[in-house]
Image: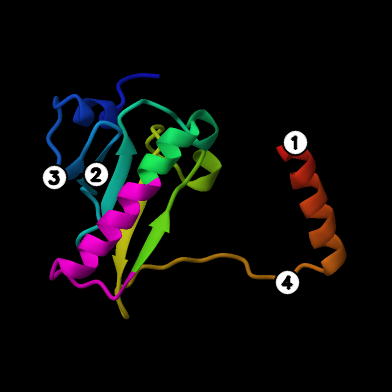
Amino acid sequence: MGICVFCEIIAGRVEAGVVHEDDSVVAILDHKPATVGHVLVIPRVHVVGLADADDAVGTAIWRTARRVAGALRASGLRCDGVRLSLSDGEAAGQDVFHLHLHVVPRFPGDGVAVAAGREKRSRELLDQDAALIREALT
């Protein structure tokens, strides 16, 4: 696995622009921000992805992201909106394999591109997909 840069930041062995920390999470500025003020909310416990996180970790991440989003809007940094983003797994674009949530300030013309295929699925296929997911949740 190697050294986890987020674990090193949490342990204080690597510098970071910490904007918040508590017993559950650390929130830091992304060193390669999509926009100025881009924050990463990272659980203190090392978990790779969503399936590895318990409800307490998820709650702590969400609570902090919500607070950071409000702080971004009040900070004086350019922030007309906020995008939350979490990549779970390499195929989803995760490049640091320690769960983290991006809190990205957005504004018109910020140059951040979010691309996705938006082809409409039929009602029949949506119902089939929903049934598969419901079954997997039980």
Q: Which residue is mark 3?
A: 17
Closer to us: mark 4 or mark 2? Answer: 2
Q: CA distance from mark 3 to mark 2?
A: 8 Å
Q: Earlier in the sequence, mark 3 or mark 2?
A: 3
Question: Which residue is rendered at x = 21% and y = 45% of the image?
Answer: 28
Q: Which residue is mark 4?
A: 120
Q: Secondary structure at mark 3?
A: loop
Farthest residue, direction right: 124
Question: Percent position (x, y) of residue 6?
Answer: 28, 32
Question: Percent position (x, y) of residue 66?
Answer: 34, 56
Q: CA distance from mark 4 to mark 1?
A: 27 Å
Closer to us: mark 3 or mark 1? Answer: 1
Classed neighbour count for the residue bearing mark 4: other residues with Cα under 10 Å, few (<14), some (14–19), many (≥20): few
Q: Earlier in the sequence, mark 4 or mark 1?
A: 4
| 56 in relation to 111, above or below | above
Question: Which residue is rendered at x = 79% and y = 61% of the image?
Answer: 126
Is residue 102 toward the left or the right of residue 86 in the image?
A: left
Q: Which residue is mark 2?
A: 27
Q: Earlier in the sequence, mark 3 or mark 4?
A: 3
- Report if residue 34 is visible in the image: no
Range of the magenta residues? 62-81
Closer to us: mark 3 or mark 2? Answer: 2
Q: Which residue is mark 1?
A: 138
Q: Earlier in the sequence, mark 4 or mark 2?
A: 2
Q: Main secondary structure of the magenta part?
A: helix
